[in-house]
Amino acid sequence: MSIIYGAVLNNFYSGKSHQGGQRIFALRLLLSILFILAAPVKGWLALAPSRNRAIVPVWTPTSRSADFILPSSISHIYYSSLGCQNSKMKSKSSANEAGPMPSAPNSYSSASNNKLKPREGVIDLQTHTHRKSPADVLSHLSNACQELGIESYDYYGDFQADSASSYLRKFESEVAHHFGKEDAVFCVSGGMAQSIALMIHSETNKTNIEKLGDYCPSFACHPTSHVTLHENNAYSELLKMEAMILGLEGSENYDPESLKVKGCFGMEPLRLSQVQKMFHAYDERENPDSSSEKFMLSYPNKVPLGKTHVSTIMLELPHREIGGKLTPWEEVEGISCLCQDRGVRFHCDGARIFEASVGYGHETLQQTARPFDTIYISFYKGLGALSGAMLLGDTEFCTKARVWMRRMGGNLYTLLPYAVSSWNGFRKNCL
């Protein structure tokens, strides 16, 4: 029975999952009811094993706090576990080999003292990875330093060093190579990485903005973008940018807090037609009879599209908040071509790009990264690192990114524990 569930859920996130929306929604609803009804029997539901590790989603009344809400979380992990075998990415638990984060205060396995503790050999959907004790993690990092040949510290990001003299620059070069980009910059957090990317792309288009006059710098994204839902409007408060929300009929009604409370599984992923519609409305800004550009308003300050300058299209792969849905690949390539024609940068929020690459059936990460000018990836999720992110792009972009990282206080005296666990997770799970 679990194999059937997995097969059906797996199909939701294939490239064809965007057809027959009503049928898929009905199937999702049915499966959700089945999972919820079955959960109280034993408190958990076991799916088919992935190699030698059982994948056991844990149902709780507070599952909304999970990274992926049931049943989408189940399909996401089940799917990525099976698919990794076809994309040269190992489906081993990242926790055993990548130096996972310390145990979270919330675990959902019962113990004799009525406190909840993690089960051995079980993946808890409330956390990104199976988590060991802090002592075990630090001991593992010591072993990782020896395996990776790390004998010296990095200092303030090793900005002036090269890959021959700095383990950090060697790590960055290795990741850039596997994604097919010229360079990469290790960052302590994804929030900082995304802000840096938006700022650089906005600055790159500064000349165009000045020619246009008093226009607000902005970027465009899906309604469920992490940037608009979970980062306290950093793009507005710190970068002084506006977000153009794509895919909404009447963006003046956009309410991120409502989406977080009510959920948004019924939404489709970002589509090429939505990007085309925005650019068409932008072209009509000089037409006094046009109402299309007035119809699209930015967030949070409700600036009409015609008074903004969109420098970046941001695409999340996969879309976390709507259960891991993927924009059809041919449309990703179409958006890339459209951005090139418009002189707009195409940025990927690739916090889970490894899973997305599996979902598209790509043989290499380069294939997934090719349409994008810049990419952000995360190491602490599926790869199990302590913390850490990376920005990838051309040499000019990464040179600017290092400057902005210093301005934002991100080049710590040493990044060693985060970088080592990230590199080790990348090596053990992706190569």
Image (cartoon, rainbow, N blue to C red):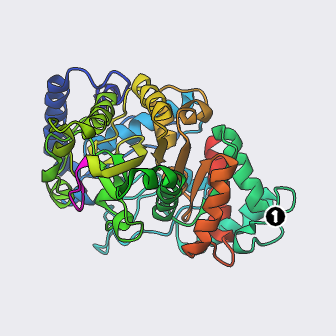
Badge 1 local density, few (<14 within 10 Å), some, or many (20+)?
some
Quarter of the N terminus within the rendering: top left
- Residue 146 falls within the magenta-colored stretch: no
Say which residue appears at 59% left-offset and 26% top-offset.
363
Direction from residue 329 to residue 283 in the image, left or right: left
| Kind of residue at disc 1 | Ala
In the rendered image, which residue does mark 1 sit on?
A: 161
Residue 233 drawn at (x, y percent): 32, 65
Q: Main secondary structure of the magenta part?
A: loop
Residue 365 drawn at (x, y percent): 59, 35
Q: Which residue is more in the foreground, 188 or 63? A: 188
Q: Is residue 228 visible?
A: yes
193 vs 87: above or below: below
Q: Which residue is more in the foreground, 150 or 160? A: 160
Q: Which residues are magenta?
A: 298-305
Residue 362 drawn at (x, y percent): 54, 27
Say which residue appears at 73% left-offset and 47% top-offset.
174
User: Toward which corner of the image does residue 419 lie, by quadrant?
Assistant: bottom right
4 vs 131: above or below: above
Q: Residue furthest right?
A: 164
Quarter of the C terminus within the rendering: top right
Direction from residue 287 to residue 330 in the image, left or right: right
Q: Residue furthest bottom?
A: 413
Residue 90 drawn at (x, y percent): 59, 39
Direction from residue 266 to residue 143 in the image, left or right: right
